[in-house]
Image (cartoon, rainbow, N blue to C red):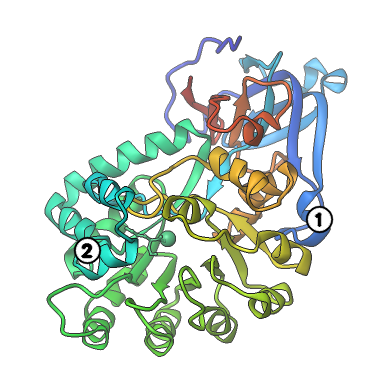
Amino acid sequence: MWSVGPFPAVEYRSAAMPALLIRDLEQVVSPAGGPAPLRGRALGELGVLERGYVLCEGDRIARVGPMAELAAADVPAQTVELDGRGSSAVPGLVDCHTHACFAGDRAEEFALRAGGASYEELHAAGGGILATVRATRAAGQKGLARALERHRGWMLAHGTTTFEAKSGYGLDRETELAQLRAIAAAGGVPTWLGAHAVPPEFPDADAYLDEALREVLPEAATLAEAADVFLERGAFDASQARRYLEACRAAGLALRIHADQFTEAGGISLALELGARSVDHLEATGPDGVRVLGRSDVAAVLLPVAALFLGRPMPPARALVDAGAVVALATDFNPGSAFCESLPVVMSLACTQLGLTPAEALTACTVNSAHVLGRSDRLGRLEPGYSADVVLLDASDWRYLPYHLGGEHVAVVVKEGQVVWER
Ligand code: NIG
Ligand code: FE
């Protein structure tokens, strides 16, 4: 079992933070290969070190190696030790696509869908995204922060040490900015999803975009790292998405697109044209889209829970990997189309439904998702110099993470050198 040594109360990120040695691990597992993003064959090449250790100093990983080569002189005085016998270590998981900053739930809608109503019908009738917009507007800054804190705890318990979260449930200046502030305050990576749906107080998408770009973008650009748009029938079309994204790019934001979730609506070619970071979803993407992405640097972020939750076809993951595309995996955690915060479940689905190997699935939700967030130089690997974000599993074979569907093998989560969660 885990023995967490005496852990002095220290300030998070304090320079005086003691070192942390995770020793006697059965496996230390990390994406191998060159610089991220890893694509093609390299996606599935993991480094698996048997009987190893991870030494963290401050918020960084200082050394990783076999126990047999660990010398007492390598370990600073007053190092806290974790006993890794019977366990394995993987990098802290990175969730590069969530809508975790929402208030309320859509349990009632879930029941209606189970009874036969479709997601698109509910949306068209003023439910769906707009139902969550009403709850999120009503929550206020404090209520929103509380809800996000709860959701962040769920994510952490599944091994997610870094999460991106989008706005898009405010759709007015005050609530969109409140969402972005709450996400940053919770340590998330904020994305401005100003073009998620058209709120009821506007006659059409163009009128809404005029106001959002004029009134919200200037401040959103100071809070967010990227902008995102829902390019879909019933949401925003390609020319509206282009207008929104061009303005966001001019304001310094990286670009992402919810593309091909229900229909192929031009999201991939727009992403290439504008140099977007990613296209996300791709459940409806056909062979041409796969070919184009295979030759491009735009990442394909696949969200198999959304497909499962809505009973939609799975995205063409195997074809994308084989075509050489940059592939990442994420939860899409939100109250409507993917009420699931677990990247281990996403990895299980990747292996059982998307045709990926466990190794490919791990790389796709560690260093490749870090790449989507512009952080692959410091997140998503167990290597010296990387952020000391480590997930310890109570299984000696790390593959239990995807293998055990819904299993709970995350035993300890270390973020920036500190134990932040224990089962
Ligand atoms: O990525 N497709 C658009 N947005 C979300 C769903 C949001 C919701 O239903 O609340 C998605 O699936
Ligand atoms: Fe999404």
Which residue is nearer to you in this view: 215 or 172? 172
Identify the secondary structure beneath mark 1: helix
Q: Is residue 26 left or right of residue 253?
A: right
Identify the secondary structure beneath mark 2: helix
Q: Is residue 169 left or right of residue 72?
A: left
Please tell me how many numbered marks the rendered image carries: 2
Q: Residue at x 24, y 70 (%)?
A: 124
Q: Identify the disc placed on residue 42.
A: 1
- Crowding at mark 2 (Cα within 10 Å: few <14, some 14-19, many 20+): many
Q: Position of residue 310 (x, y in %)?
A: 42, 55
Q: Is residue 404 above or below residue 375?
A: above
Residue 61, quarter of the rendered image: top right
Q: Identify the disc placed on residue 22.
A: none
Q: Residue at x 62, y 20 (%)?
A: 394
> Any atom of ligand 2 within 8 Å of the CB at mark 1?
no
Q: Identify the disc placed on residue 130.
A: 2
Which residue is nearer to you in this view: 116 or 76? 116
